Image: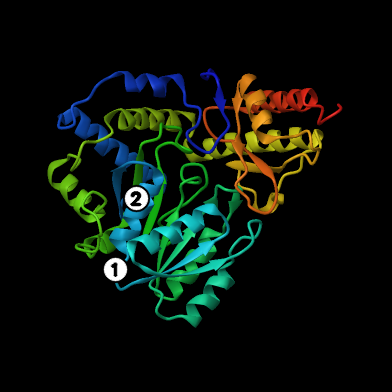
Amino acid sequence: MSTAAPILLTPGPLTTSARTRQAMMVDWGSWDDRFNQLTASTCAQLLAILNGAESHHCIPLQGSGTFAVEAAIGTLVPRDGKVLVLINGAYGKRLAKICEVLGRTFSTFATAEDEPTTAADVDRLLHADPAITHVALIHCETSTGILNPLPQIAEVVKRHGKRLIVDAMSSFGALPIDARQVPFEALIAASGKCLEGVPGMGFVFAEKQALAAAQGNCHSLAMDLFEQHSYMAKTGQWRFTPPTHVVAALHEALLHYHEEGGLPARHQRYANNCQALLDGMAELGLRSFLPAAIQAPIIVTFHAPKDPRYQFKAFYERVKAKGFILYPGKLTQVETFRVGCIGHVDIAEMQAAVAAVAQVLQEMEVLDI
């Protein structure tokens, strides 16, 4: 694959295709019919990925994925609701912080960063606290790459008559989620992740009846998904200035996505990337933080070398000089670094990245290969 240097081995922003970048070379009028059609087509394609057109609306929102998470909580959770936030990493903690800032009552359930939340945990917690109205789950926790069991948790939440909000930022488009089989009130993702667009647009798949009942819930003018959807449905336009170039890039990235073979092909490429990365790093003696059974093919956390000559900043800069940008670790207890498997990259580039890591660790006299 032809990619721009440097290659971003991060969970977003990530390496995009030349044709996706090229799509941003056209200026669009925000009220222009052609741009409105571009927005509508983008939303329809997004809904199709999870078979959600019958049950959910797709509401796009300016800003990062976190903007969309905050908008979903603020719009769909009533001010007298209560959210159970499931945490095993930094993004679960961020979701709890959003609830705190918005003044939504919440409780948390935290597991270790290498331990998925289980359906049995959720079942017990919902039995214990009938005041809970919503459960919030991070599907793939990007701080480690851990995959939480969404289908099983969704069934438990439904059985209790509660509502599920899913942060699928790092999984949507690569890991299968079918709205006809997995019940959720809202699922949130963004343009700059597994769809391989550029950052700048989040989107929320909101259950139609729940959204219709959400008028007046929101704390914010700009982040009110009820009003955003209502205005778009009436006019075809965004309420406020849209990220026109981001929408155009995402539309092109979605065309590429379908040409590649859609979700199965995207998942397989990422899985191949992940396996090549794990195999190559293992040969260097670098251990992954998670066991294979709970490792999503999105981003891999590796234990840092224990040699005192290893310093992440120097390691990062040296690998960057060889054309690859990695990610620092996000764990508090052990020193790690992270390598993304997503973006417009393939096995050859993952293998080249491993070779660059090997060269740098040799130069730092951390590895003697």
Which residue is at the far left? 234
User: Is 241 above or below relative to 48?
Assistant: above
Inspect this view and state whether residue 340 appears: no
Inspect this view and state whether residue 147 appears: yes
**Percent position (x, y) of residue 12?**
49, 36
**Pair 1/2: label in front:** 1
**Percent position (x, y) of residue 253?**
40, 30
Q: Label 1, on which residue?
A: 78
User: Is 268 above or below relative to 214?
Assistant: above
- Colour mode of the rendering: rainbow
Q: Quadrant of residue 19?
A: top left
Name the amino acid, label 1: Pro
Task: Identify the residue at image location x=61%, y=24%.
Answer: 320
Q: Are there few (<14), some (14-19), or many (20+) residues within 10 Å of tag 1?
A: some
Q: Quadrant of the C terminus?
A: top right
First reached walking from the N terminus: tag 1 or tag 2:
1
Q: Are there few (<14), some (14-19), or many (20+) residues within 10 Å of tag 2?
A: many
Q: Quadrant of residue 70?
A: bottom left
Helix, strand or loop status at disc 1: loop
Q: Which mark is residue 177?
A: none
Helix, strand or loop status at disc 2: strand
Q: Quadrant of the N terminus?
A: top right
Which residue is at the far front? 308
Q: How many marks?
A: 2
**Percent position (x, y) of residue 349?**
63, 24
Q: 28 or 330, which lies in front?
A: 330
Q: Label 2, on which residue?
A: 204
Task: Identify the residue at image location x=50%, y=31%.
Answer: 14
Name the amino acid, label 2: Val
**Percent position (x, y) of residue 328?**
61, 39
Please indicate whether residue 186 sits to the left or right of residue 118 in the image: left
User: Is 312 above or below relative to 96?
Assistant: above
